[in-house]
């Protein structure tokens, strides 16, 4: 689990070093990785497929990050624009992975895609807070997860390898947050030094994610599968069906908004 925050701190710091030195963050990484061919290979592949060095579309910027975890090597380039509320909107992610001999390429791609989605949701909003020793968050209305309309286009490119096969379950997760943070800096000039982004941006704690709950149908599965319990606090959902939340998460198209307050 340490790879998530370790990758964020090292890769965003490295981007700051490159900026202070007046160097391209990709080129400086490549230069310093001359004795690490597997790191360098995924970095170069991700940059090439993302069009690094060419101007991004208007209103967008790119960020790059790299991490070795579970003996696998992953590089990602995030292409980011800005929402009206100042949060980044991730438009595109290009991922390159070296996990040794390819046992099942489809599974590798699926794991990278899922890891990027999981890591992006955590980076943007994922926070558990305590009030008098009790967890405040209770469900998806106050612990949001990434939705279909918030999911970027994801490309996964696999480096052919004859090395022993290594992990793919988690290595896609740690790289997305620093890649997005680095892109955000190049777009807005702001560094995010606290996660999630909704807390780490200027005015942290004042921009909060809200998703309205409008009765039993807000997760778009039959009302008999769940009941809405109002106990004077935030709305909470209990479901007799252990898989109802999953069906709801997949089906949910609830409009989201951000509010100042």
Image (cartoon, grey):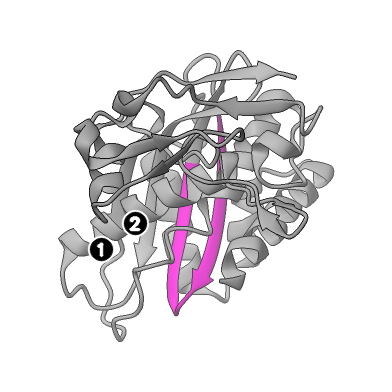
Residue at 66% x, 28% y is: 208
Q: Is residue 48 left or right of residue 10?
A: left
Measuring from the top left, give residue 243's x and y in whole percent.
Answer: 24, 53
The furthest residue to the front? 231
Q: Magenta-highlighted stretch: main secondary structure?
A: strand
Please give the range of residues in magenta.
61-77
Measuring from the top left, give residue 220's x and y in whole percent.
Answer: 25, 28
Q: CA distance from mark 1 to mark 2?
A: 6 Å
Location of the C terminus by quadrant is: top right
Residue 18 shows which numbered tag? none
Residue at 15% x, 69% y is: 104
Location of the N terminus by quadrant is: bottom right
| Residue hosting label 1 | 108
Taking depth in this image into account, of 23 and 195 the one nearest to the observer is 195
| Residue hosting label 2 | 112
Q: Is residue 142 left or right of residue 134?
A: left
Q: Quadrant of residue 44?
A: bottom left
Measuring from the top left, give residue 166's x and y in whole percent.
Answer: 34, 80
> Is residue 141 highlighted in magenta?
no
Taking depth in this image into account, of 142 and 63 the one nearest to the observer is 142
Q: How many marks?
A: 2
> Is residue 32 depicted above or below 79 in this figure?
below
> Is residue 76 highlighted in magenta?
yes
> Is residue 108 depicted above or below 47 in this figure?
below
Tell me whether circle 1 and circle 2 mark residues in contact (CB < 8 Å): yes
Q: Is residue 187 left or right of residue 222?
A: right
The furthest residue to the bottom? 164
Secondary structure found at label 1: helix
- For label 1, the crowd category at 10 Å Cα-Cα, with few meaning under 14, some 14 to 19 and many 20 or more, is many
- For label 2, the crowd category at 10 Å Cα-Cα, with few meaning under 14, some 14 to 19 and many 20 or more, is many
Secondary structure found at label 2: helix
């Amino acid at each position: 689990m340490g790879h998530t925050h370790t990758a964020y701190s090292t890769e965003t710091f490295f981007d700051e070093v490159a900026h202070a030195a007046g160097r391209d963050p990709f080129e400086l990484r490549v230069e310093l990785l001359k004795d690490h061919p597997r790191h360098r290979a995924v970095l170069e592949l991700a940059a090439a497929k993302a069009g690094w060095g060419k101007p991004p579309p208007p209103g967008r910027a790119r960020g790059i990050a790299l991490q070795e975890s579970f003996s696998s090597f992953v590089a990602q380039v995030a292409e980011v624009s800005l929402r009206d509320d100042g949060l980044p909107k991730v438009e595109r992610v290009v991922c390159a992975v070296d996990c040794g001999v390819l046992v099942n390429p489809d599974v590798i791609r699926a794991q990278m895609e899922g890891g990027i989605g999981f890591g992006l949701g955590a980076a943007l909003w994922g926070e558990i807070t305590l009030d008098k020793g009790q967890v405040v968050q209770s469900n998806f209305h106050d612990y949001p997860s990434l939705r279909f309309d918030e999911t970027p286009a994801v490309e996964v490119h696999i480096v052919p390898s004859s090395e022993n096969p290594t992990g793919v379950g988690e290595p896609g997760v740690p790289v997305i947050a620093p890649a997005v943070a680095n892109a955000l800096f190049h777009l807005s000039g702001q560094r995010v030094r606290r996660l999630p982004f909704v807390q780490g941006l200027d005015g942290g704690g004042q921009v909060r994610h809200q998703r309205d709950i409008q009765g039993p149908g807000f997760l778009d599965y039959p009302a008999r599968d769940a009941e809405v319990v109002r106990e004077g606090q935030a709305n909470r959902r209990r479901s007799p069906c252990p898989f109802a939340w999953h069906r709801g998460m997949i089906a949910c198209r609830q409009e989201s908004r951000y509010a100042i307050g």
